[in-house]
Amino acid sequence: MIKLLTGVFFFCSFVVFGQHTLPIQMDTSIIYGEISAYGIIDYSGTSIQNQMSEKLIFGGFINADVKDASMDKHRTHNKFGIEISSEIDYKNYNLGEFLKGQYGFYVRAGAGLYGSISYNDDLYGLAFYGNQRYLGDTARFTGTEANLVNFQKIGFGLVSKNLKSSLGVNYYNITDYAEGFVRFGELSADSSGSNMNLDLDARVQMTNSAKFNKGWGIGLDGDFRFNAQWINEREAFFQAQFKNIGLMTINDVDVYAVDSSYSFSGFKYNQLFSDNAKSFDEQEEIMDSLGVKRDTRSVTGFLPGFVQIGKIVDQHSDQNLQSFFGVRLYTTLAYNPLVFGGAEYKFYPWMKVGVQALYGGFAKFRVGFYSQYSVKNFYFAIGSENLIGVLTNKGSGQSIHLRLAVKW
């Protein structure tokens, strides 16, 4: 059971909420239509280094040096999260006099894998060191929480011709879901490891079905833009954006709950943390001994969405240097408010480069970089919000963002 809990908190949830600060270009030109797409692979944390997180996510052997290097970075409160997502939009602005000729429509399809975990250093120690660090001591993991959602979506909405503001509704197919939290948790043992005491109030719930459709949801995407006077009475554009704000219902969720204090003389740490595969009957015996209550039910909760407000750059500005900044929030308690700010420089009409600083979210201070290129009606942008993570395996996270668009 302890192996199950630590495994859920450290592996199921390691699949961040990525950032969306590849600046969206404000385009006030009149166009008839566009197709745009983006892709994100983005994960970051306060304590786990890349040399370990890459092996957790993509597989590989984790040796003692790798574990120790990340252990040294851990403090009382630690966070980690990841996003792997993509979307493609088709927008048609050529609808004649529909809604007085001011609006077009869009169709959107996408997929996302979002997860987060908030935990302390003792949980990391339990997951990766087992009995070696806590014989004759107490491991405390109160307040741990983790979640994971994997979905696909399809949506439809309206978009304004001038400012390109939009509002739409999406239908979501939920393919994976897991969530866990520990209200109170302490695990102690004597120096030999033969006597152990567990005080635990925790719940883990997850889908185990092989079905592609495990639930559904309804949510909104919105992108509202407006102009205002800025420095030296110049016009600037601002954006209030939200994505995946809504509810989901997941069916046939297996719920494991425990709320008791247990003392054992027969169990040893290496029995609970053993990497050897146990039979179904052995797993059932351990869970029964720990007093785990099991149930299957439907669960309703919030979709993994975000809200971002800030200043965006103007694609048609006559200035070579423009600033952008903002703040972002996600619908998970583990995510701290993130603030970002940076500048974009136009080297040529077809080439723009930007740098930015970010603080918050699941990590601490980071530096990002992006570049955008255009050829006639085609646009391509690539960037990263964690340059240190890209350049060294001692960094805490990786970030790759791509965006493509064609307009006519």
Image (cartoon, rainbow, N blue to C red):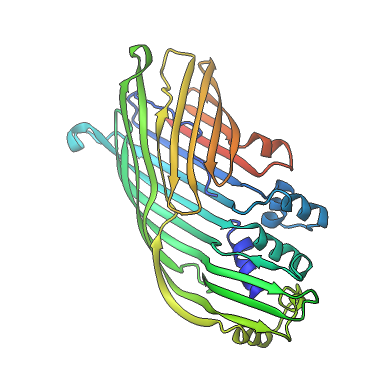
* Residue at horizontal 60 percent and vertical 66 percent from the top: 8
Residue 386 position within the rendered picture, expressed as x and y whole percent measured from the top left: 62, 37
* Residue at horizontal 47 percent and vertical 22 percent from the top: 323
Residue 56 position within the rendered picture, expressed as x and y whole percent measured from the top left: 69, 57
Q: Is residue 321 above or below residue 288?
A: above
Q: Quadrant of residue 24?
A: top left
Q: Is residue 128 above or below residue 362?
A: below
Q: Is residue 198 above or below residue 353?
A: below
Residue 308 position within the rendered picture, expressed as x and y whole percent measured from the top left: 41, 39
* Residue at horizontal 30 percent and vertical 43 percent from the top: 167
Callout count? 0
Residue 57 visible in the shown view: yes
Q: Is 64 positioned to the left or the right of 141 in the image?
A: right
Q: Is 236 positioned to the left or the right of 71 in the image?
A: left
Comparing 145 with 92, the one in front is: 145
Q: Is residue 294 above or below residue 2?
A: below
Residue 180 position within the rendered picture, expressed as x and y whole percent measured from the top left: 53, 66
Residue 408 visible in the shown view: no
* Residue at horizontal 68 percent and vertical 68 percent from the top: 138
Q: Quadrant of the C terminus?
A: top left
Q: Quadrant of the N terminus?
A: bottom right
